[in-house]
């Protein structure tokens, strides 16, 4: 297992991906989505995956989540719990907010009183206290994503996978949720793998930004983001590094187009 040494602290990888490839189909219809991807993620890191559409970002999350099987290579999360959050909140419309948050707890066999208390605590974490009896259609898009985040946290996961969770939101709501996610990430001591198409969002949130090539997806760049937190998405530091990453991404897209 690889070890990262930062400020004298040695930290074991919690996600270890070595030469992972994923192929869909077989024979002449085979599609190579990921090609020998290697990536280590350390405990407590916030790592953003960035690349052109179709580069395999979401595929990689599905593999880490265990929703699909790798074709070759090694993928190890050390038996840690993993939760996956999608771009759409995917809440059950017939359940109340608190019912949606309680669902993972119910599936784990948690008793009614205990799961209700835990769900109320999680709604406080995402700052939705007092909204437990509402139905999803009564909430704004940003509020629904908060519920989805609370539901993911109810799984008591060590690793949170997020697949463009703020992509459909307006800029102001997204900016507010960036702050909220950063707070929760710190308070809950989570390890986050975050997929996005938004370069500034990646630099705003990430400790590292991993750039994937166009299909098949390969790791072509690993950018360390060292600007102090909290960051603003429109700050000169974030804008400057986002421009650097955008130039690299454009070069990759142009290479693939040719």
Image: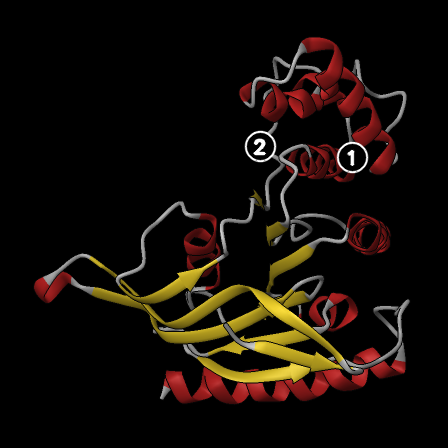
Seen from the viewer's position, the closer of residues 191 and 167 is 191
The image quadrant of residue 93 is top right
User: Can residue 51 be seen at all in this image of the molecule?
Assistant: no
Q: Is residue 128 above or below residue 49?
A: above
Give the side of residue 217 with respect to residue 150, left or right: left
Q: In this view, does 128 lie above or below 54?
A: above
Location of mark 2 (residue): 90
Give the side of residue 100 with respect to residue 140, left or right: left
Q: Residue furthest top?
A: 112
Q: Alpha-carbon distance for marks 1 and 2? A: 12 Å
Badge 1: few (under 14), some or many (20 or more) residues near its Cα, within 10 Å?
A: many
Counting from the top left corner in percent of width and height, residue 44 is at 71, 62
Seen from the viewer's position, the closer of residues 114 and 194 is 114
Badge 2: few (under 14), some or many (20 or more) residues near its Cα, within 10 Å?
A: some
Total number of numbered discs in the rendering: 2
Counting from the top left corner in percent of width and height, residue 38 is at 44, 75
The mark nearer the N terminus, 1 or 2, is: 2
Give the SS element for disc 2: loop
Counting from the top left corner in percent of width and height, residue 181 is at 79, 51
Location of mark 1 (residue): 143
Q: Is residue 96 above or below residue 226?
A: above
Give the SS element for disc 1: helix
């Amino acid at each position: 297992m690889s070890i990262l040494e930062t400020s004298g602290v040695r930290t074991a990888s919690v996600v270890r991906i070595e030469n992972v490839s994923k192929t869909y189909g077989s024979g002449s219809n085979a599609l190579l989505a990921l090609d020998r991807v290697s990536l280590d993620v350390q405990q407590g890191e916030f790592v953003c995956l960035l690349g052109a559409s179709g580069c395999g970002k979401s595929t990689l999350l599905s593999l880490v989540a265990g929703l699909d099987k790798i074709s070759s290579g090694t993928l190890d999360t050390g038996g840690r719990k993993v939760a996956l959050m999608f771009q759409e909140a995917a809440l059950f419309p017939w359940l109340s907010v608190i019912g949606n948050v309680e669902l993972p707890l119910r599936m784990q066999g948690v008793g009614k009183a205990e799961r209700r208390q835990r769900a109320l605590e999680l709604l406080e974490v995402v700052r939705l206290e007092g909204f437990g009896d509402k139905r999803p259609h009564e909430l704004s898009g940003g509020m629904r994503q908060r519920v989805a985040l609370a539901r993911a946290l109810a799984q008591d996961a060590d690793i949170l996978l997020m697949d463009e969770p703020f992509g459909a939101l307006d800029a102001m709501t997204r900016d507010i949720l960036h702050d909220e996610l950063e707070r929760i990430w710190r308070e809950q001591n989570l390890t986050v793998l975050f997929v996005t198409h938004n370069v500034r969002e990646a630099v705003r949130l990430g400790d590292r930004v991993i750039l994937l090539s166009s299909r098949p997806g390969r790791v072509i760049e690993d950018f360390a983001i060292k600007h102090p937190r909290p960051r603003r998405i429109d700050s000169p530091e974030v804008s400057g590094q986002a421009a650097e990453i955008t130039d690299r991404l454009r070069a990759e897209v142009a290479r693939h187009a040719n």
